């Protein structure tokens, strides 16, 4: 077991837990944006920054979602430097996703009055990487990835060519926190696969009726009598 | 039929109810901020069969998960219900926990009280609370009625079949047989070894050696002149039908290795040339070999090699034939330095496993082999004594004298590849080669466990590649066959032979032709499902007149129980203030990939819609049975909506079209009996169109209100 102090509370956690997991376990609120428990932590949004002090080192900020709990660490989740860092991160995230209710609530809580930056598009991608990780870890196909570097970094299928591995499940769209990702960005065209055979009408071998069983008529009778009664 | 189903539910075993555990997720304050999770927990504790409830701030967190697995063990839970977020995000996490504690993953039900309640009905917490309670009731009802899991655990047959006996096929067969596995080597030719070894450096010696060992090996059964005509069964236990001459026989193997290799494409009959002058690369290889063996001189003056490229699919040149051609040029030069050797090419591929053919190219140039590129527009013209070609560098026509032309045609998969690929359900590229599904991640791994592909049937392979692939595949096959039993997961339909009348309805609608009718004693035939092909869409369940087919988790009892639970809630009886009519109750049968996904998105984007909508998750809309709609109406639903995928997007073939047909028929029948057909509706949704979902629900609810 590892003993550490979070917000002046002595806490004991099994080995291998991250600071965020320890906080969640003990009811200490740490805001997150790019974290999802079903996925590997990624540390992209920097909202979960906490202040870590160790006996031998000066205090510093670390991402709680990726940083493991260490013996004797003293963690502060709400110090002034943490709040300052978060305020900046929220402001930057809001520059792209300025409609996100959770971010707006967090901005208010942190006393952020004005967002100084703004990306041209509404609901912009903030590169949290949730969709890419979900495609890999939940769906298991890795049809999309983060491509390019710097300001041209974006989510797209490799080489911007429709990935044959994509199954069109829409998990990436579902997990996208800002609504930036559309399925069309991934599949390019709508069709999951071509329907190569014409649809044939099928008749029941027993009653020559289309898919309907003889007893169904009785049900309908019951239903209509109940309805008219 | 409805009565029959009720009696079916009633008589369904009077066994003790399954022990159900419920976890109510607070999701920080995303759920707890709107719903009173403690109250939900209290309410759900009184549901039938529920023996344990807990609420967790984050059940998906590591510690939350470990508490769940502890609870499963401590309270001997048999079914688990998670009231949390969208099932598709967390289902696999919780299934993993259940499987770790020895519980089948299909005994999990994730009820979405976040995307379907707290997110969309945040403005009306009371309604959200009622709906959440009801959703949990529905989930419990489903878990109570769920079919026992089907596990197709079958014993792995400790034998393998290798189709094709080129270098890679022989090597795999030997490697497996040396590892104490019985191998059947199936070759459609009358001898082992194939023909392509003449192009692979050093392959002839290897093959001669291997053929010798193979023919003496006690664990290898060689079947010459034999063709594979059908493959059925499943991973680890395949039944293979073989034909030799006019004789059919069956083979039972655990793994199948496809090693049918490549062949040179035959030239388009439109090409005309003097056939006494022109030989193929393989013929020339034999000629060179003969001369070398006889220590003779090559009685030729001018040899021209043409690396032919066609502008059709599969017409490209390959590194195997290019490198082999250069090697032949060198050999010819070494046999007789006075020969003029010229190579005409459009593309020169030199890549080789473990290096490249670059050194060979330099060596050939040093020996004085001439290389000319030719253009697509001006292919070489083979005359009687000369070859005419335009040199693109000088733009001058060239006349190259020749007394032997070696024509290299593109290498393509064997002509039986398509048939075999269809039998084994392997995807092919445009050229006909078998494609690796995820080349970058797991080369050599194909769709079905137990089916492996090796050598030229993926792409022309040289000696080193063929050997490498063969050994990798042998190792994989060995590991696969090392398991004693194999449990296949996934949804599969199962037919109860005691109930099946052999009417022939289900084979008609099966999108993958997985169901076949078999003769059995007496008048009736029997339908059987090929588990290898079944994709679990549930279409067959709908058309079965005697309901002999089951699909775990989506059986009729489970679906009907959910409908009953959805409509029995007292919450739905409440009247909305200001409107004298009660809020309409709408049951939505949502296809997992279309409508359900759209509903998830609507929730995630917090687009609100009427709270009295109950969504029943179906795997595919093909599973929608007209009985389900009738059952909903009989239980007091005001509207039934069948949500399907958009046209051409059904993940199971044509499930949405079947649903459309069924809804249309039922509407007609309802109208004939004086029942307003507008109460039954079919809508298609794009996977990510949450807006359409919320809107449709609003308009449908408004229509019902009138």
Image: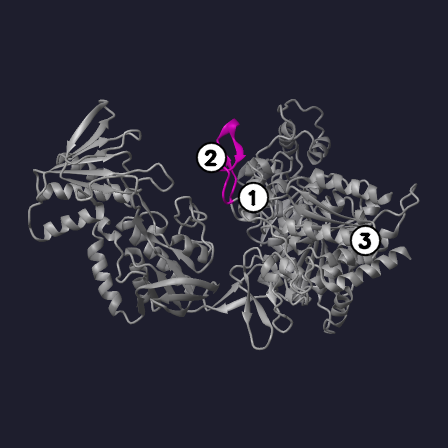
- Chain letter for mark 2: A
Q: Is residue A192 left or right of residue B52?
A: left
Mark identifier at residue A159: 2
Q: In the image, which residues are magenta?
A: A142-165
Determine if residue A71 is in view. Answer: no
Q: Which circle, 2 or 1, is nearer the viewer?
A: 1
Residue B192 or residue B190, whichever sits in front: B190
Q: Earlier in the sequence, mark 2 or mark 1?
A: 2
Which class describes the residues within 10 Å of circle 3: few (<14), some (14-19), or many (20+)? few
Mark identifier at residue A192: 1
Query: How far across and down, in percent of the image, does residue B351 sit?
Result: 29, 41
Mark identifier at residue B339: none
**Are the two marked residues, 2 and 3, in contact with CB atoms closer than 8 angstroms?**
no
**Are the two marked residues, 2 and 1, in contact with CB atoms closer than 8 angstroms?**
no
* Image height of B370 relative to B682, above or below: above
Circle 1: element type: loop
* Image height of B249 relative to A119, above or below: below
Query: How far across and down, in percent of the image, does residue B11 sit?
Result: 75, 72
Q: How many marks?
A: 3
Q: Residue at x 74, y 59 (%)?
A: B627
Quarter-wise, where is residue A20 in the image? Answer: top right
Instruction: Find disc 3 in the rendering and name its residue.
Output: B672
Q: Whole-Å distance between the Cαs marked 1 and 3?
A: 38 Å
User: Does A149 lie within the magenta span?
Assistant: yes
């Amino acid at each position: 077991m590892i003993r550490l102090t979070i917000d002046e509370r002595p806490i004991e956690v099994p080995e291998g837990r991250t600071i965020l997991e320890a906080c969640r376990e003990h009811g200490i609120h740490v805001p997150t944006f790019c974290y999802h428990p079903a996925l590997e932590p990624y540390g992209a949004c920097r909202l979960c920054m906490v202040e870590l002090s160790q006996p031998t080192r000066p205090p510093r900020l670390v991402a709680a979602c990726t940083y493991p709990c260490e013996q004797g660490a003293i963690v502060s989740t709400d110090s002034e430097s943490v709040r300052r860092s978060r305020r900046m991160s929220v402001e930057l995230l809001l520059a792209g996703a300025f409609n996100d209710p959770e971010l707006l609530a967090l901005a208010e809580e942190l006393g952020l009055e004005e967002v100084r930056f703004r990306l041209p598009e509404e609901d912009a991608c903030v590169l949290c990487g949730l969709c890419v990780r979900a495609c890999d870890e939940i769906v298991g196909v890795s049809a999309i990835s983060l491509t390019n570097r710097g300001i041209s970094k974006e989510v797209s299928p490799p080489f911007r060519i429709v990935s044959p591995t994509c199954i069109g499940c829409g998990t990436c769209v579902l997990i996208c926190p800002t609504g930036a990702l559309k399925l069309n960005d991934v599949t390019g065209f709508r069709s999951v696969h071509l329907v190569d055979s014409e649809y044939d009408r099928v008749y029941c071998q027993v009653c020559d009726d289309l898919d309907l069983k003889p007893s169904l008529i009785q049900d309908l009778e019951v239903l209509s009598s109940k309805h008219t009664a | 039929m409805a009565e029959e189903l009720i009696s079916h539910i009633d008589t369904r075993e009077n066994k003790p109810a399954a022990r159900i555990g419920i976890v109510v997720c607070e999701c920080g304050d995303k759920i707890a901020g709107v719903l009173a999770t403690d109250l939900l927990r209290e309410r759900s504790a009184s549901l039938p069969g529920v023996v344990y409830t807990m609420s967790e701030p984050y059940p998906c967190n590591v510690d939350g998960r470990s508490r769940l697995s502890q609870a499963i063990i401590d309270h001997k839970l048999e079914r688990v219900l998670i009231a949390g977020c969208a099932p598709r995000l967390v289902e696999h996490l919780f299934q993993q926990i259940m499987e770790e504690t020895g519980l089948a993953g299909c005994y999990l039900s994730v009820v979405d009280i976040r995307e379907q309640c707290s997110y969309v009905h945040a403005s009306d917490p009371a309604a959200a609370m009622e709906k959440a309670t009801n959703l949990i009731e529905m989930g419990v009802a489903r878990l109570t009625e769920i079919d026992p899991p089907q596990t197709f655990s079958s014993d792995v047959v400790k034998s393998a079949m290798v189709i094709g006996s080129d270098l890679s096929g022989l090597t795999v067969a030997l490697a497996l047989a040396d590892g104490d596995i019985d191998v059947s080597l199936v070759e459609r030719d009358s001898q082992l070894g194939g023909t392509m070894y003449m192009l692979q450096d050093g392959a002839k010696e290897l093959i001669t050696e291997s053929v010798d060992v193979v023919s003496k090996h006690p664990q290898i059964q060689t079947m010459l002149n034999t063709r594979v005509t059908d493959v059925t069964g499943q991973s680890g236990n395949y039944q293979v039908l073989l034909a030799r001459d006019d004789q059919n026989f069956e083979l039972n193997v655990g793994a199948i290795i496809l090693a049918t290799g490549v062949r040179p494409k035959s030239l388009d009959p439109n090409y005309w040339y003097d056939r006494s002058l022109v030989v193929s690369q393989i013929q020339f290889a034999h000629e060179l070999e003969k001369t070398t063996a006889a220590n003779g001189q090559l009685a030729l003056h001018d040899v021209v090699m043409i690396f032919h490229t066609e502008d059709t699919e599969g017409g490209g040149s390959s590194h195997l034939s290019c490198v082999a051609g250069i090697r032949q040029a060198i050999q010819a030069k070494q046999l007789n330095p006075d020969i003029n050797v010229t190579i005409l090419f459009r593309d020169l591929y030199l890549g080789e496993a473990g290096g490249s053919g670059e050194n060979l190219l330099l060596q050939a140039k040093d020996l004085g082999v001439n290389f000319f590129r030719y253009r697509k527009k001006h292919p070489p013209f083979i005359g009687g004594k000369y070859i005419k070609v335009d040199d693109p560098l000088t733009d001058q026509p060239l006349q190259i004298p020749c007394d032997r032309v070696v024509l290299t045609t593109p290498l393509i998969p064997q002509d039986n590849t398509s048939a075999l690929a269809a039998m084994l359900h392997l995807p092919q590229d445009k050229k006909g080669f078998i494609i690796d599904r995820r080349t970058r991640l797991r080369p050599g791994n194909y769709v079905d466990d137990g089916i492996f592909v090796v050598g030229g049937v993926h792409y022309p392979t040289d000696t080193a590649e063929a050997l490498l692939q063969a050994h990798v595949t042998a190792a994989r096959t060995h590991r696969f066959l090392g398991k004693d039993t194999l449990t296949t997961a996934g949804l599969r339909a199962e037919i109860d032979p005691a109930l099946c009348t052999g009417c022939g309805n289900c084979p008609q609608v099966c999108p993958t032709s997985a169901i076949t009718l078999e003769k059995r004693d007496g008048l009736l035939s029997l339908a059987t499902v090929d588990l290898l092909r079944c994709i679990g869409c549930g279409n067959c369940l709908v058309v079965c007149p005697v309901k002999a087919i089951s699909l775990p988790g989506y059986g009729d009892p489970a679906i009907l129980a959910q409908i009953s639970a959805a409509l029995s809630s007292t919450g739905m009886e409440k009247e909305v203030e200001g409107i004298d009519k009660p809020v309409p109750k709408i049951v939505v049968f949502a296809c997992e990939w279309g409508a359900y996904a759209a509903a998830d998105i609507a929730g995630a984007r917090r687009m609100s819609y009427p709270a009295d909508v109950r969504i029943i998750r179906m795997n595919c809309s093909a599973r929608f049975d007209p009985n389900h709609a009738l059952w909903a109406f009989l239980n007091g639903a005001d509207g039934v909506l069948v949500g399907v995928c958009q046209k051409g997007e059904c993940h199971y073939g044509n499930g949405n079209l079947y649903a459309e047909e069924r809804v249309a028929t039922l509407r007609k029948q309802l109208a004939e009996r004086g029942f307003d057909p507008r109460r039954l509706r079919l809508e298609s949704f794009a996977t990510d169109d949450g807006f359409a979902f919320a809107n449709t629900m609003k308009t449908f609810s408004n229509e019902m209100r009138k």
